[in-house]
Amino acid sequence: MKNKYVYVLVLLVCIAFAGLFLTGIYMAGQKKGSTKKELTVVTSFYPMYVAADNIIGDSKGVVLQNLSEPQTGCLHDYQLTPEDMKLLSEADVFIVNGGGIETFLTDVAKAYPDLVIMNASENIHLLEDNAHVWMDPELYAGQVKKIASDMKQADPERGALYEQNAAAYCEKIGDLQQEFEELKARGSGSSLVIFHEAYAYTAKALGMNVAGSMDLDEERQISAGEVAEILSVIDSQNVKFVFAERLYGESMGNTVEAESKARVVYLDPLTRGEYRADGYLKGMQKNLELIKEAFSDYEP
């Protein structure tokens, strides 16, 4: 009877060791099988997403996601959500505009030291305190090329395809740039007022001088003194045009058109939109048509 108990005990020990051994083999197989093969690319906001979408194209094994929602807009005061942090924890690459647009960037770099952060504006000369580079097609093409170069370095296997896609996209952006050059002949040297800092780059692309600016958003409270000051600038500097965003600038735009001879042109700052590869091209083309219409009645 005693030998029987010993036999059972030995048998149970053997079964236990066998179970542990097989479990170890299974877990090792699972870990090996779960080795990440896809490249996960995350972009900070809309214009960076569209650029990356065109560069990546239909590359196999690359997953592209955007950090913020399509309608978030500019990221100056954006607060990262738990969902954002989870997404970044799973990312291999994080493509940002840079220049201070992503105010949370330092925190991200500290939290995820292995995350490859690509700054699209790294080699671009920025206007003072303003990094809305994408509003100048020539500079946006520079961002596209920078992203493609960084993607090639991070993922050499698909590098040639990234460069090829970027070149094709930059050719389309070049068509927009050519239209800007044609408009420049009419607008160059004239003064304008802007109600969104992004339009400083649009003005630069048109050779126009920004005589005054007022950055409007949902939290901006405008004083009577500011209104009087901007109207004074428009009058004293013979400003013919004001570039504004309709979402936040229409009220002030109505005041300007009622109190001065300046024409308000409502442009899209392209900080939000549909997740489409042609989103930037269509948005900027619409801006161009609005500027052309405004310029058609303008005599320098």
Image (tube, rainbow, N blue to C red):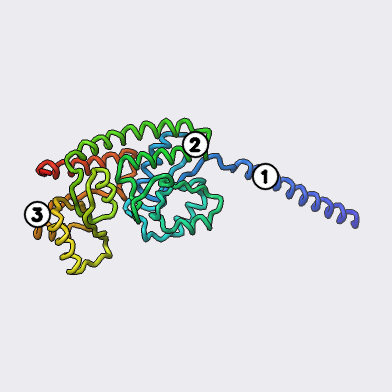
In contact (CB < 8 Å): disc 3 and disc 1: no
Q: How many numbered discs, if any?
A: 3
Q: Position of residue 273 (x, y in %)?
A: 30, 47
Q: Is residue 246 visible in this depiction of the protein?
A: no
- For badge 2, the amino acid type reads Lys
Which quadrant, please, contains the C terminus?
Answer: top left
Depth check: 141 or 248 in front?
A: 141
The tag earlier along the polypeptide, 3 or 2, is 2
Identify the element where label 2 is drawn: helix
Q: Residue at (30%, 34%) from the top-left corner?
A: 174
Q: Which mark is residue 108?
A: none
Crowding near the residue tagged with mark 3, few <14, some 14–19, many ≥20 C-alpha atoms within 10 Å? some
- Residue 272 appears left or right of 163: left
Gap between marks 1 and 2 measured at Cα: 32 Å
Q: Nearer the viewer, mark 1 or mark 2?
A: 2
Secondary-structure class at tag 1: helix
Residue 243 visible in image: yes
Tell me if mark 2 has few (under 14), some (14-19) or many (20+) residues whose alpha carbon lies within 10 angstroms of its own: some
Residue at the spot of label 3: 261
- Residue drawn at point x = 35 percent, y = 48 percent: 46
In the rendered structure, which amino acid carries the disc numbered 1?
Ala
Q: Residue at coordinates 49% horizontally, 36% vertically from top-left?
A: 152
Q: Secondary structure at mark 3?
A: loop
Residue 36 percent location from the top left of the image: 56, 42
Residue carrying label 1? 28
Residue drawn where x is 52% and y is 52% of the image? 89
CB within 8 Å, label 1 to label 2: no
Residue under label 2: 152
- Is 29 situated left or right of 135 in this image? right
Q: CA distance from mark 3 to mark 2?
A: 51 Å
